[in-house]
Image: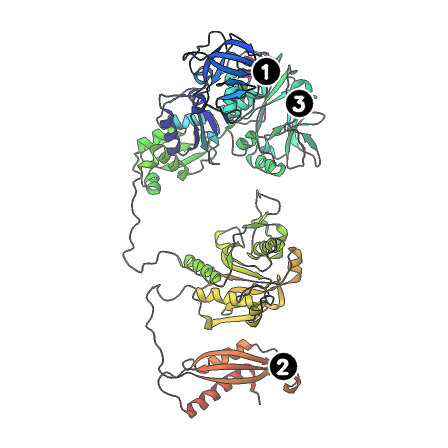
Amino acid sequence: MKFTLSWLKDHLETDASLEDICARLTMIGLEVEDVDDKAAFKPFVIAKVVSAEQHPNADKLRVLMVDTGAGAPIQVVCGAPNARAGLIGAFAAPGTYVPGIDVTLAVGTIRGVESRGMMCSEKELQISEDHNGIIDLPADAPVGTSYAAYAGLDDPMIEINLTPNRPDCTSVYGIARDLAASGLGTLKARKAPAFKVEGDTPTKLTLDLGEDRHLCPGFSLRLVRGVKNGPSPKWMQQRLLAIGLRPINALVDITNYMTFDQGRPMHVFDAAKVEGNLTVRRAKDGETVLALDQREYKLGPNNVVIADEKAIESIGGVMGGEHSGCDENTTDVLIESALWDPMNIAKTGRTLGIITDARYRFERGVDPEYMVPGLERTTELVLELCGGTAAKAEVVGYAGHEPKIVDFPVSEVKRLTGLEVSSEESVSILKKLGFGVEGSGDRFKVSVPSWRPDVDGKADLVEEVMRIHGVDNIVAAPLPSHGTVNGKILTTLQIRTRLAKRALASRGMLEAVTWSFISEEQAKLFGGGAPALKLANPIASDMSDMRPSLLPGLLTAAQRNADKGFGDVAIFEVSGTYEGDTADAQRRVAGGIRRGTASLNGAGRLWSNAAKGGGKPVDVFDAKADAIAVLEACGVPMGNVQFEPGGPAWYHPGRSGTIKLGPKIILGTFGEFHPKTLEALDVSGALCGFEIYVDAMPEPKKKATRTKPALDLSPFQAVKRDFAFVVDKAVEAGAILRAASGADRKLVTGVSVFDVFEGSSLGEGKKSIAIEVTIQPVERTLTDEDFEALTAKIVANVTKTTGGVLRA
């Protein structure tokens, strides 16, 4: 939001300096982003052309002698057609930066004649686009004085970084109101427009929106006859130019001025181009309109338009149509001041790709009570600058504003901010900001003004009191000490999130950040797509649903890398997924994928990778290893973890698994992806992935401590024994591992599979699984009898659990 200092002082009576105003704006939450003090215009002075002689070597150039009021005349070569003796204009000496042409002047020689400066045009000083001649001032212009001060070019420009929750400050008047409430001056009251009304507005308006009346809560319209549309006055043009708007004509400039001055977007129709009456309605599917930006837009039922009896004349609240636009031939105008639904305006603007100052304000919420006063003020400006006769206004649909009432305990100021603000000061601040306050003691009923749609509850009122009282009054205080060295600061979920990230990063995976919303098709593909998880206002059509899984975003990210030549990708993300629209339905998940040959041993086709098992496409076991790494890093007791074959439908049914802790707790899933899943996502290549539900891990039983337990090493030599069991093909290797481990949990410290064999020699439907068992004596060296007893116990346990027998 940009405005000039003089513009602000139209609404604020203050003697504060530019520096004080900028500092106060930032302190009350309207952060100043840029200040242009117009120092660039200070070197330009008013000068008089004493003589103008024809250039000896150029027909279109003249040699001027210019009196700058500082001594002897200065020689200037000039090509302007209006350069003549006696002309008074703006002079720039050598060394001056000219903003309109982005040039710093120097002494030069033009066609053999020295030139020591420049007489400037309006374009060169960014006053207008006129470059046909140099500035021609009245005869009484004071020679030798500052041109910037004379022409009003020294008016500083301020730009604030406006947050989306402050629609009231999208106007200069609203900013002045906030400054006045902070004690930096007095707000000037809006003058009630006074003009004569003659006759009725013959053009009638109908709201044809059925049950969706909220799309246009009110509409006001007035005819002004006999206007003369020409350039707007210099003061208005300068203000519009200062904030980056190009003056067009008086009628259009008035609407732009009202948008920034009062935060009230307006629109004017050329009444002669409107056929019959106007109707506010939904656009029909496929209807088009040529807008004021010279682009044709295809509309649909989600767009609200203003149409006459033949065609669409305006996209309501966003942009007017070219057909009914005002030009120099306009004599009768219809002035529109309407209210529009913020959500619909945002969707329309985003869908059509239109960004306008009107959309910016309507999608944030304009003051509904200023709809009719805004029409009156605009009418007054039209009559003042363009002449004409105003008809009676037509107001349709507006039922008045019902203010929100908020219960406000003043004690909340201290609780939420730490500030000691008395009840009297809190009430005074709210009243200065326009809030109505009733009650006594420490609890009040506060009515929210119509221009503050962002205020909903008591916390919002606390914010208002805090920012006006002064954020700088909050005393800095250190965080309280926990009093113990090993005090737990982070939650278990936060700790495990960090541990999971570190574990995956240490396995050569790169962290990715993907969108939390995906398309409906992708959501349904991964078990989501519930109506409760659809976004009311998605930023794009392919981002309509909250994600039920991290995998769609990671898979498409990997494909984008592959499309650019980086096919071997290993990426992960630890973030939230959504199973419902409540807080307890949001999950913290660690997910990752590997593509191509991006295994733990490294990617690519190097001979050394092949020797280490690398260089081959990633598979289910790579995903399983990553998942196990996360579980181990988070402290899950791996001895109790179970792996079951099969997983969700998006994995390959024969190359996936589910990780459980007991029969009910699912810790995660892993595997290679189903070909149909990859086809639906338009993803290709060797791909495997996993998801671990970090929030499903049970809380550790022991208290958190940073002290490591004492190292307890056995002084006796560990012994390894091999066993091969013949079992049915349906028996899982994990069942054999668990049975062998359970034979003696004190002595058996490790069990692993080192061979799997299938052949006709074993019998139909049989396989051989060979395991290595690590036996660690603790109290004494084991004898042959001890080993035989333990071996028998291992074999018996495996036979009992799996039906397996020792292979002969």
Front residue of this view, candidates 587 and 255: 255
As drawn, which residue projects farthest toward the front?
A: 112
Does the magenta portion include 380?
Answer: yes
Residue 296 pos. (x, y %): 68, 32
**Viewer-nearest of labels 3 and 2?**
2
The residue that mark 2 highlights is 758
Residue 799 pos. (x, y %): 54, 85
As drawn, which residue projects farthest toward the left?
A: 483
Q: How many tags in the picture?
A: 3
The residue that mark 1 highlights is 57
Q: Which mark is on residue 324? A: 3
Q: Is 13 drawn above or below residue 514 in the view shown?
A: above
Front residue of this view, candidates 714 and 126: 126
How many other residues sit within 10 Å of disc 2, few (<14), some (14-19) or many (≥20)?
some
Element assignment for label 3: loop
Q: In this view, does 612 lie to the left or right of 315?
A: left
Which sits earlier in the primary sequence, circle 3 or circle 2?
3
- Tell me the amino acid under the disc marked 3: Ser
Q: Is 616 drawn above or below residue 679 in the view shown?
A: below
Q: Is residue 376 visible?
A: no
How many other residues sit within 10 Å of disc 3, few (<14), some (14-19) or many (≥20)?
many
Task: Report how far apart the C-alphas of labels 1 and 3 lie in the structure.
Answer: 52 Å
The quadrant in which residue 492 appears is bottom left
Task: Report how far apart the C-alphas of labels 1 and 2 lie in the structure.
Answer: 104 Å
Residue 719 pos. (x, y %): 44, 84
Q: Is residue 412 left or right of residue 311?
A: left
In the image, the segment drawn in magenta is 379-398
